[in-house]
């Protein structure tokens, strides 16, 4: 997507202007971000998803057994029949992985790395429903899908911001609202990380689409990366102090000892190749790995299927990305990685971004052994599937 073209989604800003002036800095309200927007999923269909075992869902009742009572799905139909007439919210995660029409909305956000996008959460609320004043540690675009929602935006927060005493939710104890907007269908509000916000339904049948982004914390990076490194280090690689000087005080941990320890850590922590491999695998891990299931197929079967007009599509739960690594390339697929030759750069771009793969757009690549092998592996692993199997 060209970065210097004004985008209706961003209120006429170019991607460059938005990233320079707003991204992770300040909110942006866009009226009519998607013209004539109609929600591709109805409230009843959203509630139906919340009945499914594999779907993550929550109900929040503002006036339940405690303020903002949280109930977790999967639910049964009777759960919805017993709800009050107002002041409750249904939240369903990763709807894009179950409803293709919702997944299509993500095409609007391709000015940002696809591996940064987490999911599309949809909330349905009756009048007055909301999840309380809170903040997120990641960027979010809030697209109004149905009805009206009032958004109030407040102060910047952090881990020291006081929270209400609540068994499940992180609701701010103090909310200092500064801006107040009512969003109609097609309107969108971008919020940077850590900005307090408070949304409440201004009408019955209020639906909001939340496009969230993956932002691993420093604690997650350190924990997961060091675990990744540890899996590949031999047991004999240990702290060493060869040629050290006699200890002046045997109970002291001196500066030279600490420098030797730091050198041992730096040797691996500064390994950019290992960092790239871990990061690519970590950022492409699927939210629901159990939904990424493949089929047994070989190269001959794949080629025959393509010749007969078969179409390959990405599993909605799969995540793909690619990168340069020293003298070759690497593709990351649903938490796994595989090295690829540099001459297949455009092929990797095609696999990661194309809506579908077929004999025509694979014509220039199917003769490469590595390309055929990758397609077979992705089918076996489940990140690619035949369109007829959807």
Image (tube, grey):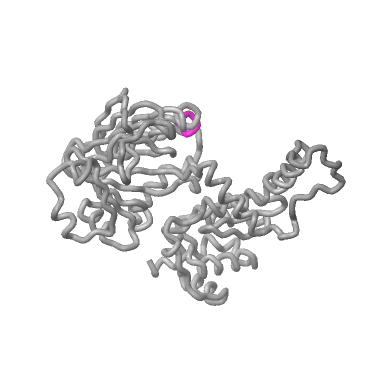
Residue pushed farthest top? 178
Read off the magenta span.
14-18
Quarter location, residue 136? top left
x then y, percent, for residue 270: 69, 44
Q: Is residue 339 left or right of residue 387?
A: right
Q: Residue at 32% across / 37% down in the picture?
A: 171
The one nearer the camera, 178 or 4, is 178
What secondary structure is the magenta-colored segment mainly?
helix
The C terminus, quarter of image: bottom left
Q: Is residue 19 left or right of residue 50?
A: right
Quarter location, residue 256? top right
x then y, percent, for residue 20: 50, 28
Q: Is residue 80 left or right of residue 226?
A: left
x then y, percent, for residue 207: 25, 44
Residue 342 higher or lower than 148, as above or below: below
Is any part of residue 32 visible from this angle?
no
């Amino acid at each position: 997507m060209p970065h210097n073209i004004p985008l209706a989604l961003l209120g006429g800003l170019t991607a460059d202007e938005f990233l320079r002036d707003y991204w992770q800095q300040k909110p942006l309200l866009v009226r009519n971000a998607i013209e004539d927007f109609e929600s591709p999923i109805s409230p009843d269909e959203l509630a139906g998803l919340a009945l499914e075992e594999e779907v993550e869902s929550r109900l929040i009742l503002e006036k339940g057994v405690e303020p903002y009572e949280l109930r977790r799905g999967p639910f049964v139909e009777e759960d919805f029949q017993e709800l009050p007439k107002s002041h409750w919210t249904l939240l369903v995660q990763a709807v894009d992985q179950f409803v293709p029409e919702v997944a299509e909305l993500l095409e609007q956000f391709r000015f940002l790395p696809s591996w940064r996008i987490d999911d599309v959460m949809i909330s349905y609320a009756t009048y007055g429903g909301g999840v309380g004043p809170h903040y997120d540690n990641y960027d979010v675009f809030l697209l109004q899908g149905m009805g009206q929602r009032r958004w109030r935006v407040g102060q910047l927060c952090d881990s020291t911001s006081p929270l209400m005493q609540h068994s499940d939710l992180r609701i701010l104890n103090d909310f200092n609202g500064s801006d107040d907007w009512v969003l109609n269908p097609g309107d969108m509000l971008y919020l940077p990380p850590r900005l307090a916000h408070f949304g409440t339904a201004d009408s019955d049948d209020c639906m909001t689409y939340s496009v969230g982004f993956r932002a691993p914390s420093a604690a997650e990076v350190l924990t997961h990366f060091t675990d990744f490194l540890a899996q590949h280090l031999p047991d004999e690689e240990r702290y060493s102090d060869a040629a050290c000087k006699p200890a002046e005080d045997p109970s002291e941990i001196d500066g030279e000892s600490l420098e030797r320890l730091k050198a041992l850590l730096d040797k691996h922590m500064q390994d950019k190749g290992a960092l790239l491999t871990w990061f690519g695998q970590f950022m492409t891990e699927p939210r629901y790995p159990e939904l990424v299931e493949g089929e047994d197929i070989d190269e001959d079967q794949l080629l025959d299927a393509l010749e007969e007009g078969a179409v390959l599509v990405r599993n909605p739960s799969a995540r793909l990305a690619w990168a340069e690594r020293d003298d070759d390339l690497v593709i990351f697929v649903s938490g796994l990685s595989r090295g690829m030759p540099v001459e297949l750069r455009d092929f990797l771009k095609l696999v990661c971004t194309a809506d579908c793969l077929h004999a025509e757009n694979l014509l220039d690549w199917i003769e490469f052994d590595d390309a055929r092998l990758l397609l077979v592996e992705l089918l076996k692993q489940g990140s690619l599937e035949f369109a007829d199997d959807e």
